[in-house]
Amino acid sequence: EAQVTQNPRYLITVTGKKLTVTCSQNMNHEYMSWYRQDPGLGLRQIYYSMNVEVTDKGDVPEGYKVSRKEKRNFPLILESPSPNQTSLYFCASSLLPLVAGGFDTQYFGPGTRLTVL
Amino acid sequence: RKEVEQDPGPFNVPEGATVAFNCTYSNSASQSFFWYRQDCRKEPKLLMSVYSSGNEDGRFTAQLNRASQYISLLIRDSKLSDSATYLCVVNSDSNYQLIWGAGTKLIIKP
């Protein structure tokens, strides 16, 4: 079954304790991205990756890191989480947009609900 | 002005009615337009892409108005199962990013 998986689904942590949220897709997609979703603000892109070892900042990258060592995996790392990073996080993947306007369907993981105390 | 704007709603609509909502975008050079559906606390899923000539998929019709920079979604014969939040998505012109609206909440009532 084609899917994007995220782990953990729910996480409660404390300020400053490093954490990693994993994301994996089995569709051989080049393009992967991380979003956070907050009430009234919609989805905001944190980072995206066009392919292995190619990552770029989205609109809200501060406080986050990513890596893309393998095509299928795109982990999100919070080195020192803070309460303002409490949010619902989604990982998504798609075929590579050939041009900036050539986006394809985005497939989302089920989401990770993070609470930072 | 936000890059992509939607009326947050909620739109309360009786079952069987027709409902329409718009999404305005600020970047005149945008080329990719989509409607996604998101159920409460779930991941967004593609409802339909929006093409220049307009397109229809069953009870759903999407249209693009480039001159006024908005896209629309029309739902005919609404069902209880159409209750969800509908997200408008537009590509950014300067880089490989998608810009998401905050969504319009639709509630279909029996």
Image (cartoon, coloured by chain):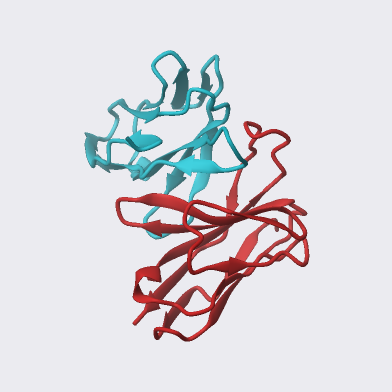
x, y percentage for residue A54? Answer: 73, 56
Left of A77 or right of it: where is B2? left
Shade representing chain B: cyan
Is residue A45 visible in the rendered image? The answer is: yes
Residue B26 in the image: x percent, y percent?
A: 41, 28
| Residue B110 seen | no
* A102 relative position to B51: left or right: right
Which image quarter holds the N terminus of chain A? bottom right
Q: In the displayed structure, would residue A97 be above or below residue B26?
A: below
Question: Camera-side residue: A115 or B19?
Answer: A115
> Which residue does the image show at 54% across and 27% down from the upper left?
B30
Q: Residue at x 52, y 83 (%)?
A: A18
Counting labels gives 0
Answer with left or right where residue B26 lies relative to residue A4.
left
Camera-side residue of B44 and A75: A75
Q: Residue at 37% x, 30% y: name it.
A: B23
Q: Judge left or right: residue A28 versus residue B110.
A: right
B85 or B27, nearer to the observer: B27
- Vertical placement of A5 versus A33: above or below? below
Above-or-below relation of A8 to B10: below
Residue B5 placement (x, y as % from top left): 34, 35
**Chain in red on the image:** A
Could you tell me residue A16's position as x and y percent? 44, 84
Q: Quadrant of the C terminus of chain A?
A: bottom left
- Is residue A106 depicted above or below B48 in this figure? below
Tell me the quarter of the picture where residue A28 sits: bottom right
